[in-house]
């Protein structure tokens, strides 16, 4: 036992004896406080000494030779580097001064569709004919770093941001003499797609807001310059102003609604509901619009039919679909609403996973096949010249799509030019089978 510890034990015993022999409670209290303070100081000193000894203990250097020798093989420098570049999502390509590939990773193999699964030992011109890639690597071999090089591939279509930096060499001698170049291909396909969607959205929203706003400003100016005294015309102008203001209001409401649905802020509470009364409500709401074009609205839902859905949201979906069916129908046409039950999409045919399919059929002119894939996008219109005259915001089908998904269902469309179009809302029979 160290001499210091023996001394401390003796001091503690002596202090305890003195404490017990003192006759006064006050003196005992004072001695107890002194002993406690001394013990606290000693304990603090020991903790500090132990911490210092641990940080300065021989053989604890992280990069010492002994530690490196005891490190598992998987963490050796070469293995760790290989695992890192192999797991990168970005394509990595290293070429030597002769433009021959000396290193690459799996992402680069996928990028260049290498049939051998390995690009090494191939010349850059053998794996790509893209002049932007070749030019970027050539400049890097001359000592010039290149970044922000746009690279597009086809089949599938993807977009990459390429950065190439020189490797080795003596940059002080005319900027050349490089030993090779390293290129990193960063996939920006999704970013490009989102940027394109954003630009389309801004273009569409500005156009759809500018048109009614221009009409409002024009008629207000007409009223201000004297037309206000003409009672008949002033009332007509005010009616046009009100209609365009309502159009702007509807557009803003639909944008806010769609954003709330996409953000998951709209709660859908499915329950077992009767479908026929909901369809009757939709028909009553749009009956005036249909009568103006002599279009017959038919509810073919059986009285006892039920579906598992949020009643208010289902009515919203059906209203959008029936309203579109009326707008893009022919004069003296028809719109039929039906219900079918069939296996859910992708489900086995034994009927273990059934889905309710609500069909909205019209007898319109139909939609060309090339438009069907984009029909549920924001502001997408088949006939942009005709759509503004028919009203609407261009967001109705996008809202229907997201509400159907919120029900764990979906929506599809089939159309035949000259015969008509059918939209189908697919709902799971119950919430257990929806998950």
Image (spheres, grey):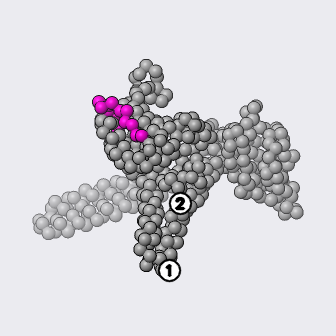
Q: Is residue 358 magenta?
A: no
Which sits in the foreground, 187 or 225? Answer: 225
Asked if residue 200 is positioned above or below residue 74 in the image, the reply reads below
Which sits in the foreground, 161 or 9? Answer: 161
Residue at image mark 2: 208
Task: Indicate left or right for 237 with 366 as reference.
Answer: left
Q: Picture quarter containing residue 34?
A: bottom left
Which sits in the foreground, 332 or 27? Answer: 332
Task: Indicate left or right for 287 with 76 as reference.
Answer: left
Q: Can residue 423 be seen here?
A: no
Query: Residue at 75% across / 50% down in the picture?
Result: 182
- What crowding class fits label 2: few (fewer than 14 Cα within 10 Å), some (14-19), or many (20 or more)? some
Query: Residue at 50% across / 64% down in the picture?
Result: 212
Q: Is residue 298 magenta?
A: yes
Which sits in the foreground, 15 or 32? Answer: 32
Q: Secondary structure at mark 2?
A: helix
Task: Indicate left or right for 268 with 148 as reference.
Answer: left
Residue at image mark 1: 225
x and y, in percent, of residue 84 in the image: 64, 43
**Looking at this rendering, what residue extends furthest in the bottom direction?**
225
x and y, in percent, of residue 6 in the image: 34, 54
For the residues marked 1 and 2, what is the alpha-carbon distance in whole angstroms?
27 Å
Query: Residue at 42% across / 40% down in the picture?
Result: 296
Identify the magenta region: 296-309
Query: Residue at 46% across / 36% down in the picture?
Result: 361
Classify the position of the C terminus by image quarter. Answer: top left
x and y, in percent, of residue 275 in the image: 33, 36
- What crowding class fits label 1: few (fewer than 14 Cα within 10 Å), some (14-19), or many (20 or more)? few
Q: Picture quarter containing residue 298?
A: top left
Dot placed on the residue nearer the N-terminal end, 1 or 2: 2
């Amino acid at each position: 036992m160290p001499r210091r510890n023996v001394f401390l034990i003796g001091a503690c015993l002596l202090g305890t004896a003195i404490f017990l022999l003192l006759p006064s409670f006050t003196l005992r209290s004072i001695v107890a406080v002194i002993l406690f303070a001394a013990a606290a100081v000693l304990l603090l000193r020991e903790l500090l000494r132990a911490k210092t000894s641990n940080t300065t203990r021989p053989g604890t250097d992280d990069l010492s030779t002994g530690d490196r020798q005891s490190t598992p093989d998987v963490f050796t420098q070469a293995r760790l580097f290989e695992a890192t570049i192999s797991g990168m999502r970005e394509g990595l390509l290293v070429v030597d001064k002769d433009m021959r590939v000396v290193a690459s990773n799996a992402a680069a193999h996928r990028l260049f569709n290498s049939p051998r699964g390995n690009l090494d030992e191939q010349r850059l011109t053998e794996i790509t004919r893209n002049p932007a890639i070749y030019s970027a690597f050539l400049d890097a071999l001359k000592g010039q770093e290149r970044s922000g090089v746009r690279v597009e591939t086809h089949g599938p279509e993807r977009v990459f941001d390429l950065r190439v930096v020189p490797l080795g060499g003596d940059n002080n001698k005319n900027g050349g003499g490089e030993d090779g170049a390293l290129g990193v291909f960063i996939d920006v396909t999704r970013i490009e797609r989102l940027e394109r969607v954003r630009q389309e959205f801004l273009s569409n929203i500005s156009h759809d807001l500018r048109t009614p706003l221009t009409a409002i400003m024009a008629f207000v100016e007409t009223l201000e310059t004297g037309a206000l005294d003409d009672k008949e015309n002033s009332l007509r102008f005010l009616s046009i102003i009100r209609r365009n203001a309502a159009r702007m209001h509807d557009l803003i409401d639909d944008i806010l609604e769609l954003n709330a649905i996409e953000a998951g802020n709209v709660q859908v509470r499915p329950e077992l509901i009767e479908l026929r009364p909901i369809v009757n409500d939709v028909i009553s709401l749009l009956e005036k619009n249909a009568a103006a074009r002599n279009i017959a609205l038919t509810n073919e839902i059986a009285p006892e039919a039920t579906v598992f859905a949020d009643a208010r949201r289902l009515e919203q979906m059906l209203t959008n679909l029936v309203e579109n069916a009326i707008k893009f129908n022919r004069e003296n046409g028809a719109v039929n609403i039906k219900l079918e039950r069939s296996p859910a999409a992708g489900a086995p045919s034994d009927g273990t996973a059934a889905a309710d399919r609500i069909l909205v059929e019209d007898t319109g002119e139909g939609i060309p096949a090339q438009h069907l894939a984009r029909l549920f996008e924001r502001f997408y219109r088949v006939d942009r010249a005709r759509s503004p005259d028919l009203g609407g915001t261009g967001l109705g089908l996008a809202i229907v799509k997201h509400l159907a998904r919120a029900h764990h269902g979906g929506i599809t469309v089939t159309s035949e030019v000259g015969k008509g179009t059918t939209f189908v809302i697919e709902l799971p029979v119950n919430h257990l089978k929806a998950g």
